[in-house]
């Protein structure tokens, strides 16, 4: 039974949460589908702990620990470096701050085989985002995303060859920090969603979490712009910019930006619009006031 189902490489992204790895790996090895685990370590200084607590414990398993030779933190890009090293046709991904039970992993694998789409877990409590047209990576309708962008760290399954969508992208800080978002947009299709209660582990909400970084939300928008530019004009910005208003600046720029557009702001909890005369994003509810100032000054 296991040999028939074992077609999945699990790629586990880790950063200074060695204490969570044992319970996560136990769950991964309890599935029927996962045959090997690639553990990408973004904190090379923790290697002695990983070797003692993880590698020696699973010496009889196909566990491969990887980290960047430069000893740098590759953030979410490390996930894709791990995928490139995987040997199985399907990939399962998750982070080291969430617990996904074996039956939930198998559900993701089963749904992927049924739909042949990227399948990921979504916190059931996030249905409120769809109701207000808000946080674009979490908008969904009837269990299927209404756009292209989403997270991979809570559990996802997709074909290994999908890594080709990001393999040729420019390597820089944006790619490292926002590889998940770039990837799921570059796939350029709707994804299947499994709504569930997400069981977070220790460290999910502390300063190690990427969302705590000051530029987290602004880089989300930057990633959406880059992915769209790389899709050669395909309209893959649903939920990010108002497609009917979308106009691009100088196409020769490395990072193209919308001159007239509309995006959601998590910080202000409202839509922002681009105002050409002021070269800035402003709250949509203040548009009339700003336009009045522009007219008066002109």
Image: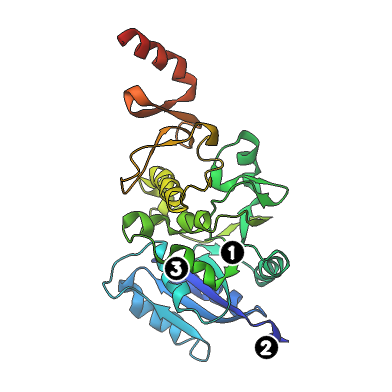
The answer to whether residue 205 is above or below residue 3 is above
* Along the line of sight, the residue nearer the viewer: 112 or 153: 112
Can the viewer see residue 7 in this picture?
yes
Q: CA distance from mark 1 to mark 3?
A: 13 Å
Task: Please report contact status of discs 1 and 3: CB closer than 8 Å, yes or no.
Answer: no
- Dot 1 alpha-carbon crowd within 10 angstroms: few under 14, some 14 to 19, many 20 or more: many
Residue 29 shown left or right of residue 266 in the figure: right
- Residue 233, position in %: x, y? 48, 47
Q: CA distance from mark 2 to mark 3?
A: 26 Å
Seen at 40% across and 11% down, the residue is: 292
Relative image position of residue 71 (x, y in whole percent): 28, 71
Q: According to the image, label 3 marks what residue?
A: 80
- Residue 3: which disc? 2
**Under tag 2, what secondary structure?**
helix
Which residue is pictured at 68% across the width and 52% down the height?
Answer: 144
Whole-percent x, y for residue 43 in the image: 34, 69
Instruction: From the top left corner, tell me how far across and down residue 63 is, in percent.
Output: 49, 83
How far is the residue under mark 1 from the one under mark 2? 21 Å
Instruction: In the rendered structure, find residue 117 and report the number of the disc placed on it.
Output: none
Query: Eyeballing the image, is 233 above or below 270?
Result: below
Q: Check contact, mark 2 vs mark 3: CB within 8 A.
A: no
User: Dot 3 lies on which element?
Assistant: helix
Farthest residue, direction bottom:
60
- Please give left or right for residue 116 compared with residue 78 in the image: right
- Going from N to C along the chain, the mark reached first, 1 or 2, is 2
Q: Earlier in the sequence, mark 1 or mark 3?
A: 3
- Answer yes or no: is residue 204 visible: no
Is there CB contact under 8 Å for labels 1 and 2?
no
Which is closer to the viewer, label 1 or label 3?
3
| Residue under label 1 | 156
Residue occupying image coordinates x 54% and y 53%: 150
């Amino acid at each position: 039974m296991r040999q028939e189902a074992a077609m999945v490489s699990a790629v586990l992204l880790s950063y200074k949460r060695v204490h969570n790895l044992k319970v996560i790996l136990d769950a991964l090895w309890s599935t029927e589908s996962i045959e090997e685990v690639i553990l990408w370590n973004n904190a090379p200084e923790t290697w002695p702990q990983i070797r003692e607590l993880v590698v020696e414990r699973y010496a009889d398993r196909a566990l491969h620990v990887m980290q960047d030779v430069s000893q740098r933190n590759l953030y979410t890009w490390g996930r894709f470096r791990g995928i490139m090293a995987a040997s199985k046709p399907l990939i399962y991904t998750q982070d080291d701050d969430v617990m996904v039970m074996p039956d939930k992993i198998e559900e993701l694998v089963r749904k992927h085989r049924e739909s042949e789409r990227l399948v990921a877990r979504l916190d059931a409590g996030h249905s409120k985002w769809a109701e207000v047209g808000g946080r674009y990576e979490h908008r969904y309708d009837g269990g299927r995303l209404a756009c292209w962008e989403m997270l991979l760290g809570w559990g996802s399954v997709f074909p290994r060859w999908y890594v080709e969508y990001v393999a040729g992208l420019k390597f820089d800080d944006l790619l490292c920090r926002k590889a998940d978002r770039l990837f799921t947009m570059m796939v350029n299709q709707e994804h299947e969603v499994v709504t569930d209660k997400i069981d977070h582990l220790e460290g999910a909400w502390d300063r190690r979490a990427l969302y705590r970084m000051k530029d987290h939300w602004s880089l989300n928008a930057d990633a959406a712009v880059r992915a769209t530019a790389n899709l050669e004009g395909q309209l893959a910005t649903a939920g990010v910019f108002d497609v009917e208003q979308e106009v691009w600046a100088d196409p020769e720029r490395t990072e193209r930006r919308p001159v007239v557009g509309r995006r959601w702001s998590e910080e202000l909890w409202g839509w922002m619009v681009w105002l050409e005369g002021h070269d800035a994003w402003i709250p949509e509810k203040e548009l009339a006031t700003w336009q009045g100032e522009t007219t008066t000054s002109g």
